[in-house]
């Protein structure tokens, strides 16, 4: 597992969880933390980024890549760094992982700051792969056609079969179709641009494989859905930041979490979708609100 730490070694520990699944941590997340006040930690989740092996490598065991295994990775990293408790932060898929980790280990979390909030429930997966086609009927028709699904088969299950197909050409076509759909999902956001990273074939296949794997399995949280277990983190302070124009992940999810989380604050960005300068400004401010006044 690739991990990194920066900022003040004596600062308040904070963990950033990247999106995707499969996006990798990149470097931009660091700008949201005061390096004088925080010990800033992040890692590339298993199967992607600079962690090895990549999910696309020969004989990779997809069954070993689950939310439970990622939570175990986080705990191993926390113990390795001798951190007692940390501020959890995450974006998009990283918010699902942050909430799942916090519910599994609430005693290890001091506060939570989330932007572009998701829980990757079965209902959310159905929305993002099928129901949302009512907003983008032209693009969805092509997305659905390329899946070549059987009668009664869900679209996500059809793509799960394609992205794991033994023929690399079929996997490549599935990844291209999936990433093209990902760009469509954010296209109503005035701030949105097609992802330049999707032009890279290796990244595209790795990313699509992990996203489809987690979506097809509803983040491996069925029976222990995040919304139904909010009492586990009821006493933790939190901030939820979400764009009104985020059709890929409607505001309803963040609002429902907020209703069940008395110590949370919900910030709605009226003119942005799945990201944008106003959202990142609120993300930075929320993180700063939990920073220590004095560093020992």
Image (spheres, helix red, strand yellow):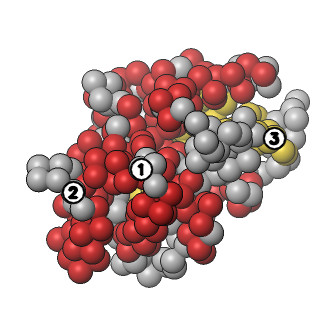
Residue at the spot of label 3 = 5
Q: CA distance from mark 1 to mark 2?
A: 14 Å
Per the image, label 1 sits on a secondary structure element best described as: loop
Q: Is residue 224 above or below residue 130?
A: above
Could you tell me which residue is drawn at 56 percent across and 69 percent down? 198
Relative to 225, 110 lies left or right? right
Work out how far the residue at label 2 is from the one at label 3, CA to CA, in angstroms: 44 Å
> Which numbered dot is residue 55?
none
- Label 1, on which residue? 165
**Residue lying furthest front in this view?**
167
Residue 21 placement (x, y as % from top left): 51, 48
Say which quadrant the C terminus sits in.
Answer: top right
Q: Residue at x 33, y 39 (%)?
A: 218
Say which of marks 2 and 3 sits in front: 2
Residue 149's label in the rendered image is 2
Instruction: Give residue 250's position: percent from left, percent from top.
Output: 30, 59
Q: Position of residue 232 (x, y in %)?
A: 40, 21
Does label 1 or label 3 sit earlier along the sequence? 3
Q: Which quadrant does the N terminus fall into?
A: top right
Q: Which one is in front in this view, the residue at disc 1 or the one at disc 3? A: 1
Q: Residue 106 vs residue 234: left or right? A: right
Q: Is residue 224 above or below residue 195?
A: above
Look at the picture and state if 271 lies above or below 87.
below
Q: Alpha-carbon neighbours of circle 2 within 10 Å: few (<14), some, or many (≥20)?
A: some
Marked residue nearer the N-terminal end (2 or 3) = 3
Q: Relative to 228, is 90 above or below?
A: below
Q: Sequence-wise, which precedes: disc 1 or disc 2?
A: 2
């Amino acid at each position: 597992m690739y991990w990194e730490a920066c900022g003040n070694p004596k600062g308040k520990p904070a963990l950033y969880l990247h999106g995707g699944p499969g996006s990798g941590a990149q470097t931009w997340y660091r700008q949201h933390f005061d390096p004088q006040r925080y010990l800033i930690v992040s890692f590339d989740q298993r199967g992607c980024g600079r962690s090895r092996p990549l999910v696309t490598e020969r004989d990779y065991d997809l069954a070993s890549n689950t939310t439970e295994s990622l939570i175990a990775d986080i705990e191993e990293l926390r113990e390795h760094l001798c951190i007692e408790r940390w501020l959890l932060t995450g974006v998009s898929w990283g918010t699902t992982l942050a909430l799942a980790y916090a519910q599994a280990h609430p005693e290890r979390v001091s506060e939570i700051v989330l932007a572009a909030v998701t829980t990757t429930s079965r209902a959310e997966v159905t929305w993002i792969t099928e129901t949302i086609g009512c907003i983008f009927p032209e693009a969805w028709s092509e997305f659905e056609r390329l899946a070549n699904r059987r009668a009664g088969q869900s679209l996500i299950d059809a793509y799960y079969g394609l992205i794991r197909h033994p023929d690399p050409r079929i996997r490549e076509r599935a990844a291209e179709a999936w990433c093209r759909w990902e760009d469509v999902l954010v296209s109503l956001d005035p701030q949105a641009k097609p992802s330049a990273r999707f032009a890279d074939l290796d990244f595209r296949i790795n990313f699509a494989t992990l996203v489809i794997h987690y979506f097809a399995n509803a983040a491996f949280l069925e029976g222990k859905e995040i919304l139904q277990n909010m009492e586990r983190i009821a006493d933790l302070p939190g901030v939820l930041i979400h764009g009104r124009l985020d059709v890929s992940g409607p505001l309803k999810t963040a609002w429902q979490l907020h209703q069940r989380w008395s110590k949370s604050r919900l910030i709605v960005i009226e003119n942005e979708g799945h990201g944008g300068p106003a959202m990142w400004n609120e993300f930075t401010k929320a993180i700063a609100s939990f920073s220590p006044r004095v560093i020992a």
